Image (cartoon, rainbow, N blue to C red):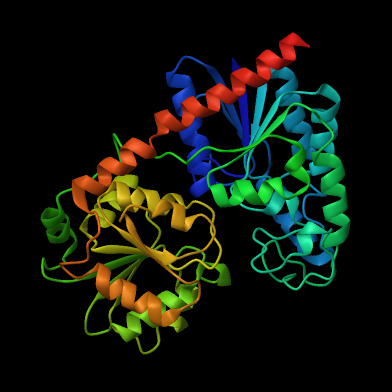
Amino acid sequence: MKILQINSHYNQGGAARIAASIHRQLLADGEEAYIAYGRGSGSEEKNVFCVDKKYEVYLSALLCRIVGLNGWWNRKAAKRLIALIEKIQPDVIHIHTLHGYYMNFKLLFRYLNEKDIPCVWTFHDCHAFVGNCGYFFECARWREGCGKCPDIGRYPKSQFFDFTHYMWEKKKRMFTQSQRKVIVTPSDWLTRTAKQSFFGRYPCITIRNGIDTANTFYPRDRKKCREKYGYQETEKLVLGMAVGFSDERKGAKYLLSAAKALMKEVKVILIGWEEKNNAMLEGITNIVTIPNIRDANILAEYYSMADVFVLPSLAENYATVTLEAMACGTPVVGFAAGGTPEQLTDNKGITVATGDQWALNKAIRKAVSADNGLLHGKMLAEKIKEQNSIQAMTEEYKKVYRKLVEEKEKN
C-alpha cells in the first residue's frame, strides 16, 4: 500500500509525533509511506515533505486574525500538496490536523472529492466539525451551525469578524462529499462527539494513540535521574508541561495555584516554560522552570524522576504527554476533561472535576504520598506498553487502510 499522511507539523507536538510514529512504523513494516507537513522544523527522514513556506504561514496567520477565515488562504501550499499527491498516487490519504495556518481547505478537498481517494481522518481535536475552535468547551453551537461565537478570541483567533457560521457551513459541504472516508479519534469521548456531528454519516471509530515504549518512553533509574539534575531523593517532585501556558485551555492557573497551595510540600518542575509568562510566577517559590526539551530521552528522564505528572487542561482529547509520563512509570493527576478519564483507569492516575482547584490540590497531595494506591514504576509502564504501543496503533490503522482499498477495488 501507498499511504500519504498530512499534518500541520512533523514530529513536533502531540499530533505530529503520532503522525511521525505511524510513518516510521509503516516504513519499518515495508509499506510505501509518505508524509506532508506545513510548518515547523524540517526533517531529513525518508519520504517527508514540507509543502509550505514560512512566510506563507505567517501571512496566512495574519489574514486569519484580521479577516476571521481559517483555512481560506495558502493556495500555493495546497497546489504543492496536490502536485505531490499526483506524483505519489497514494492508495490512501491519512489526514491529521488541518488547522495551523498552512492549508487551503477548498482547493485540497475539491481535489480529494473529485478523485474520490480513500481517506482516513484522525481528529486530534474538534476543529474539523466546529466553525473555528479547536475545542468547544461547554458551547453547543457546533451542533446547529455555530455563529455568534462566544470564544472568537481562542485559537485560531479572529480579531474583528465572526465567520464561524460561514466556515461551519462550508466545512460541512467540503468535508462530507466523498464516500470513502473513515473518521478516527484516539478517545471514546471524541468518537461519540464526532458521531453527533455532520461526520456522523461516516464510520467513526477509536484507535488509541501509541508512543515509543520500547526505545524512548520507559522507566529510567529514578535515583540516578535525580542525581543528574540536582534533586534530592526525599523531595516530592510534581512535573507539568508549560508549553502553551498562555492558552487558557491549558489550565496554567490551576497548576500554579496548586504549587502555591502546596509550597511547603512539593517542588514543581515546568518543562517548556516561556519567559513571556514569568509574571505568572509572582509569589510562588517552589517552581523550577525549564525551556522546551526536544530530546525525548531527556524528557523521559524527567518523567521517570517525578512523583506525579499533572495535566490541568480544561479541554483535552487523549494527551500523548499523559501516556509518556505513565510509560516512564509516573502516575498522572488531571481534570476529568474529554478523554483524560479514559487514560487514567485502573489506578493509573486520579481525575477530579474540571476546574475544581481544591480537588486538584488534594489529588496532587495524595499522589505524592507513599500510600496513594496508584500504579507506578514498571507495573504502570507495562500497562501502557500493552495498551499504547506504536506497533499496536499502526496495525489498527493498517486494517482501516486495507479495508478502504479493498472496498474501492470491489467498486
Considering only vertical position in the picture, is 319 above or below 275? Answer: above
Which residue: 53% across, 68% down? 314
Q: Quadrant of the N terminus?
A: top right
User: Viewed as shown, does residue 376 lie left or right of 253?
Assistant: left
Horizontal side, residue 312 vs residue 192: left or right = left
* Residue 45 visible, this angle: no
> Which residue is found at the position 85% from the left and 34% from the top?
177
Q: Quadrant location of residue 317?
A: bottom right
Q: Could you tell me which residue is drawn at 57 percent across and 44 percent down? A: 9
- Coordinates of residue 139 in the picture (x, y in percent): 71, 68
Q: Nearer the viewer, residue 395 or 375?
A: 375
Q: Could you tell me residue 106's position as x and y percent?
A: 84, 41
Front one among 411 and 59: 411
In the displayed structure, would residue 373 be above or below residue 127? below
Quarter of the picture holding the C terminus: top right
Q: Residue furthest top?
A: 410
| Residue sitting nearer the eye, 94 or 129 | 129
Q: Residue furthest bottom?
A: 283
- Tell me if 167 is positioned left or right of 256 in this view: right
